[in-house]
Image (cartoon, grey):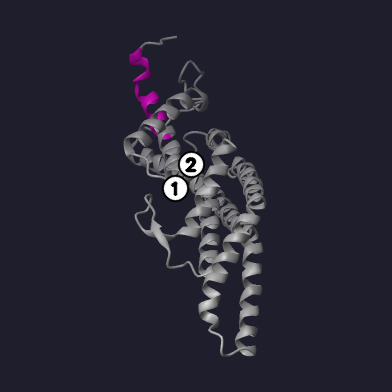
Amino acid sequence: MDTSLGSYLSVPHVLAFMLVFSRIGGMIGASPLMQVIVVPPNLMIGLTAVVSLLLCPLVANGYGLFGQPATQQLPTHEWALAVLIGQELMIGLLLGFSATLAFHGIRYMGTLLGLQMGLSVASQVDPATGGQNPVVGQWYLYLGLIVFMMLNLHHWLLVAVAHSFGHIPLGQVLTEKSWGLLAERFIQLTADLFVTALMVGLPVLGVLLVVEVALAFMAKVMPQMNVFMVSMPLKVAIGLGMMAVTLPTVVEAMARQDQALIKTLMGLFQAG
């Protein structure tokens, strides 16, 4: 077996690396860590290249690469290769964005809480997007990222993308039925994650709703009192207090959601 550098720079090896690089790059580019914090492009490309080099010998089965017996052949035509690269990129993006959806749901829940508390005007610059986001939503977003990292689920995300090569082998063109199945699972995953995000903030929303109703009754009973001036600091204080009280429950719910998410991602590309 030829293990020289020239053998690894042959056309089949380069093509296999390009396909693996596309799937890994799509996943890393759309992963929660890259979407929440600012990561230099050079670091992102370097991480993608290192992971792709490590996975290439494991996923290039059946193409006569890395000392394995050849049972099939990668396409060398430009258009066929472009289709495969685009497909691998879409698979990686779908996997990474599916994990990021959980964080968008949590941030949306925080935005609703900030609106109900009267803190919708209080916002800060999001370094990842460059836009203005409410501080309560950003707080829940970073809390979810901390839980995600503490559970080492970023490692499991790499395991999930490596596991996807077992369901969708390198160089296999997906059929229309397969894409339809992926779309159906993605829509179901989106619905489940936003329901979970709603359950995370439901206790705080419920208490704030009761406070709102109580203030409305006070406005009818004592019209001489300026309810608006009283309600603003009261809702902020009660909202922040409920966020502190429910923090252990919220962290536990986020941990359960993240663990269920990884199980879902492991079977996202499994044939129905």
Residue 173 is marked as 2
Region rendered in magenta: 5-19
Mark found first going from the N terminus, 1 or 2: 1
Q: Main secondary structure of the magenta part?
A: helix
9 inside magenta stretch: yes
Q: Is residue 4 above or below residue 33?
A: above
User: Is residue 23 something one can see in this rendering?
Assistant: yes
Q: Hey, which quadrant is residue 83 in on the image?
A: top left
Does the rendering let one see residue 175? no
The residue closer to the viewer here, 260 or 74, is 260
Quarter of the picture containing the N terminus is top left
Question: Residue 36 has which mark?
Answer: 1
Crowding near the residue tagged with mark 1, few <14, some 14–19, many ≥20 C-alpha atoms within 10 Å: some
User: What whole-number distance in Å separates the C-alpha atoms at marks 1 and 2?
Assistant: 32 Å
Whether residue 261 sits left or right of residue 161 in the image: it is right
Question: Across the whole image, how many numbered discs are drawn on residues?
Answer: 2
Q: Position of residue 117 (x, y in %)?
A: 54, 68
